[in-house]
Image: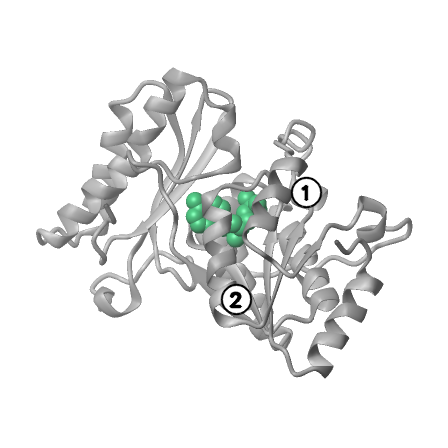
Amino acid sequence: MIATPGAMREASRRWRRDGRTIGLVPTMGALHAGHMRLVEAARAENDVVVVSVFVNPLQFGPNEDLDRYPRDWDGDLRMLTAAEVDAVYRPPLDAMYPAGAATRVRVAGVAEGLEGDARPGHFEGVATVVTKLFAAVQPDRAYFGQKDAQQVAVVSRLAADLDLGVEIRVVPTVREADGLALSSRNVYLDAEERAAAATISAALRDAAEAYSAGEHDTGRLRARIAARLALEPLVHPDYVELVDPATFRKPAPGARRAHSGLLAVVAARVGKTRLIDNHDLTKPFPG
Ligand code: AMP
């Protein structure tokens, strides 16, 4: 258990001196099987696995769910102990943002549009905390979930642009049996909303099937996803878009998508809960 950036850097120095590689899994806690898949990937590729648990207020907007964001430290500790991680970095708020802290990291381009528009300041909060976590942990590799596809694009850009020397590894989305992407926020859903939420992944699956059957028109694929979501009255889409997975721009017509991918991204409100999901339509939907 490590609680301050200084102590974290000290531990990291010792591991490095012993020639051990370090994998970092950044999380906001309330851990589930999706997070643990990231831990497994880190375990497989590094000598030392560090999991950070920090609910980062900078990445929540003023009207978002920071205060009620799920927290389950006992459960988290049980899962991390069972997974035999080497260290849990869990800094208190004032260790991360002491009085006077004034620096923010802003990524242009990929951080704009979609989640960037829907949640102003969100990716600035993410980029700032990730930069700080990388500085304290000094990992060789860091593990992020495909579930948060735009975050992956932002963090990849950040690591490359600032020469952070951290390899960004992306882990496929872990889903429930009915396709719903695992998320700490799923605990907010009541039974009816939980059933309705499966429509989001069903719509992505349907679009992937249409793509493999020869439908490559992005406008029609997008309309198909929107139409499927419209059948479920409890699901209120924020956006449905098709983008290039690396740039998050709309793909050029006629682009060779089998190589670059064609990412369908969805954000939708189900009751009071905002859910996001995505799938590269050039690949079969899992399960
Ligand atoms: P969070 O605690 O929500 O900030 O998530 C921490 C990390 O876990 C992020 O890199 C997420 O993309 C990843 N993650 C969350 N849910 C899933 C999932 N269902 N499958 C794979 N990775 C996930």
Whether residue 214 is visible, yes or no, is: yes
Report the label total: 2
In this rendering, does residue 29 appear at all?
A: no
Compared to 199, does 140 lie above or below? below
Name the quadrant containing residue 238.
top left
At 42% from the left and 54% from the top, the residue drawn is: 146
Q: Judging from the image, what secondary structure is the residue with disc 1 in?
A: loop
In the displayed structure, 117 sits above or below 145; it is above
- Place of residue 102 in the rendered image (x, y in percent of width and height, measured from the top left): 83, 55
Q: Residue furthest right?
A: 99
x and y percentages locating residue 282 in the rendered image: 22, 58
Kindly state the secondary structure of the residue where label 2 is placed.
helix
Tag 1: Cα neighbours inside 10 Å, few (<14), some, or many (≥20)?
Answer: many
Q: Residue at x 85, y 47 (%)?
A: 94
Q: Which residue corresponds to mark 2?
A: 156
The quadrant of the rendering that contains the C terminus is: top left
Point out the frontmost of discs 2 and 1: 1
Depth order, front residue of 87/112: 87
* Residue 56 located left or right of residue 148: right
Amino acid of disc 2:
Ser
Q: Position of residue 196 (x, y in %)?
A: 33, 23
Horizontally, is 129 left or right of 258 in the view?
A: right
Mark 2 vs ligand 1: CB under 8 Å? no
- Residue of label 1: 55
Q: Please state which of residues 229 and 30 is positioned toward the viewer in this rendering.
A: 30
- Location of residue 259 (image quadrant): bottom left
